[in-house]
Amino acid sequence: MTKLLEGKTGLILGVANKRSLAWGCARSLADAGMRLAFTYATERLEKSVRQLAAEIPGSIVLPCDVTQPDEIDRCFEEVGKEFGGLDALVHAIAFAKREELQGNFFDTSKEGYMLAHEVSAYSLTAVARRALPLMEGREGSIVTLSYIGAERVVPNYNVMGIAKAALEASVRYLAADLGPRGIRVNAVSAGPIRTLSASGVKDFSDMLDRIAEHAPMRRNVTSEEVGDTCQFLVGPHSRGITGSVLFVDAGFHIMGI
């Protein structure tokens, strides 16, 4: 039986380990038949990413530090050589200094503010620009990962909430720019999940407990659920959706208290 995404290609940015939301997305896309490329930002992460990529036949692994324009260029050049084109791009990159994720937001340093925005928000625009020539004419889809902290104040999320707000605004502007070229851009706002990046948020365990207590579904979500939503946004069943933020948080975002 032909799989839904058989013959399609995708690039996943942001896999760190098996608990990464990016890995949940990768597994779902691969299960649907998509061939994938993975990136790593530092040598420290390279081994882990290569080990995970080895579980998915036909995948390739490339360096891509999104703070280095030349490295982004080389990454997409290699993707173009290997795949010939690109159908999907999953942007699952975010970073802020640990010290910026606690205390008062007004104590955020300029350096920390700019770094969080460069890695977590601007990088979407940077990679979308490089992906454009590879995706145009292929009904391409770009998906990024956000969080409710972009819309509401979440204790200790601080500068990352501001960066995620910029990310979601970028989704809308990119969707408007790329729509005439046949490329869709959307975001998944995932509920909190124990990942490497989440470990930097103070009192994260308390946040998980609160979500499970107050969300309509009375539980937290899984990386597999986020991954399946990513597959939906990449695939043909979402062909009429762009510029949107889809919540995968067990319904927590609808609650007032």
Image: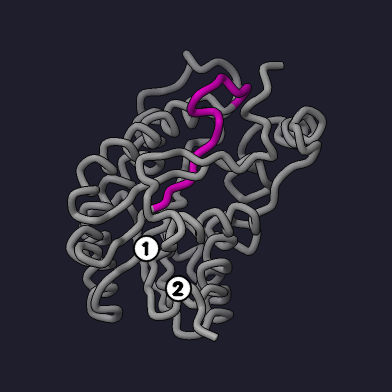
Sequence-wise first label, 1 or 2: 2
Expressed as whole percent of the image width and height from the top left, the position of residue 39 reads 41, 65
Q: How many marks?
A: 2
Expressed as whole percent of the image width and height from the top left, the position of residue 96 reads 48, 37
Q: Residues within 10 Å of mark 1 (few under 14, many from 20)?
A: many
Q: Is residue 246 above or below residue 33?
A: above
- The residue identified by callout 2 is 5
Color scheme of the displayed model: one colour
Label 1 is placed on what type of residue?
Ala
Q: Nearer the viewer, residue 180 or 41?
A: 180
Marks 1 and 2, how far apart at CA: 10 Å
**Magenta-colored stretch includes residue 153:** yes
Residue at 21% of width from left, 71% of height from top? 77
Label 2 is placed on what type of residue?
Leu
Q: Nearer the viewer, residue 151 or 116?
A: 151
- The residue identified by callout 1 is 88
Expressed as whole percent of the image width and height from the top left, the position of residue 175 reads 28, 43
Task: Left or right? Give the position of 31 relative to 89.
Answer: right
Task: Left or right? Give the position of 16 relative to 210.
Answer: left
Circles 1 and 2: CB distance less than 8 Å?
Answer: yes
Disc assigned to residue 75: none
Residue at 44% of width from left, 62% of height from top? 235
Q: Nearer the viewer, residue 142 or 156?
A: 142
**Magenta-colored stretch includes residue 75:** no
Q: Quadrant of the C terminus?
A: top right
